[in-house]
Amino acid sequence: MPVILAIESSCDETSAAVCADGNILSNFIANQTVHEKYGGVVPELASRAHMQHIIPVVDAALKQANCEIKDIDAIAFTQSPGLIGSLLVGGQFAKSLALALNKPLIAVHHMQAHVLANLIDDPKPSFPFLCLTVSGGHTQIVLCESPTNMKVIGETIDDAAGEAFDKSAKLLGLPYPGGPLIDKYAKEGNPERFKFPEPNIPDLNFSFSGLKTSILYFLQNAGKSNLYKEEFAATEEEKKEFIQNNLADICASIQHRIITILLNKLKRASLETGIVDICLAGGVSANSGLRKAFEEMGRKYHWNTFIPAFQYCTDNAGMIAITGYYKYLEGLFADLSVSSTARAEW
Ligand code: KG4
Ligand code: ZN
């Protein structure tokens, strides 16, 4: 019954979790508020905040799990991908701990961990399953054959879905991260009111940059058109007034298009692979419209659908712990010379 301590520090959340025999006993997350006024994550500030948070966060996770450091059998950490300065803080901490305790070290791929967050709670998907991972940095469809064998079968060729939400929100003058605010306003709006284009991308890949451009022109034209034409251009005043008077419908229409782009590809992936156990993962799976549309599509196509609990959707060490657990069972340990990398192969 291995007890695993896991550490996640790939972006702007410092998190630690303890997992015993595949059960998550604690999942402690410290958010960083220092980035708010910059409208995005500032890497240097993120690394410094991880340095401040890491020891109290690990202590809190152990305490919450009613565990002492001597009870730990292995240490798992996010090796990649992410912000290199942030990854190094968690990585060095994990390596030092493994060395001091003389326990095995497990290096975890952050995106694989997002997928395996679906194995934390019951009911769990059966293998093979598909997972649509949607976050601020990634949009992927992953075919998962086993906890340690998965491959990306579709991904974005430009912006991620979370970026599409956040950049649209920024164009509307909403604060960062704007995804949750679009979700909130969309609840009151009409998703059919404004039409935004669906990109014509072959295979299972995604693109969101065209949508972003069409929203930019749409707002610059105060809703008269999605196309760039000088005669449509509105004044700043007209643009602001248009946004103010139509915010809910604009948010609902943008959200609707992002969701249809995502789910149409997921449907195609299911048809092409014949797989009907289908999961969501990543921070954008907190979006209420996406969750609802995903469940509806699941009912229509007789899928078994799975969405992790909210605390395991956004960046968290619980998902690193469960991935670490499966790697432990297969003896997939890392050497102390392992290094963190900003990008990673699957
Ligand atoms: O997975 P995550 O916590 O962090 C990484 O990017 O790794 O995802 C964060 C993203 C942000 O873009 C945020 O705006 C988006 O998830 N997000 C949402 C919602 N909650 C978080 N987007 C739309 N609706 C939401 N309710
Ligand atoms: Zn993430």
Image: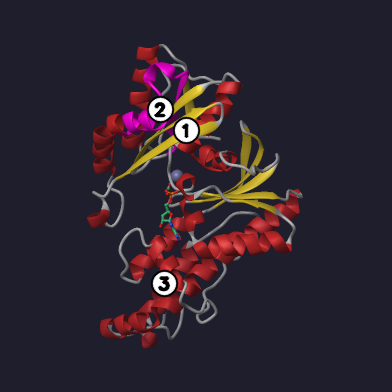
For the point 41% across and 61% down, the residue is 180
Q: Which residue is mark 3?
A: 185
Amino acid type at image mark 3: Tyr
Extreme residue in the bottom direction: 231
Q: Quadrant of residue 162?
A: bottom left
In the picture, the disc for residue 66 is: 2
Question: Is 337 situated above or below 221?
Answer: above
Residue behind label 3 places its C-beta within 8 angstroms of ligand 1? no
Q: Residues within 10 Å of mark 2 (few under 14, many from 20)?
A: few
Pointers 1 and 3 in contact (CB under 8 A)?
Answer: no
Q: Position of residue 314 (x, y in %)?
A: 44, 48
Q: Which residue is mark 1?
A: 25
Task: Give the position of the C terminus as an image quadrant.
Answer: top right
**x and y percent of residue 243 in the render?**
35, 79
Q: Look at the numbered discs 2 and 3 and tell me whether their residues touch, using CB distance below 8 Å.
A: no
Question: Residue 63 magenta-drawn?
Answer: yes
Give the mark nearer the N terminus: 1 vs 3.
1
User: Who comes first in sequence, dot 2 or dot 1?
Assistant: 1
Identify the element where label 1 is drawn. Answer: strand
- In the rendered view, does 103 fall on the left or right side of 14? right
Magenta-colored stretch includes residue 23: no
Contact check, label 2 and label 1, Cβ < 8 Å: yes
Which residue is farthest right?
274
Q: Is residue 65 above or below residue 220?
A: above
Q: CA distance from mark 2 to mark 3?
A: 41 Å
Q: Which residues are magenta?
A: 57-81
Residue at position x 31%, y 35% in the image: 85
Q: Secondary structure at mark 3?
A: helix
Which of the two residues, 225 or 76, is positioned nearer the viewer here?
76
Left or right relative to 4: residue 172: left
Residue 28 seen in this snapshot: yes
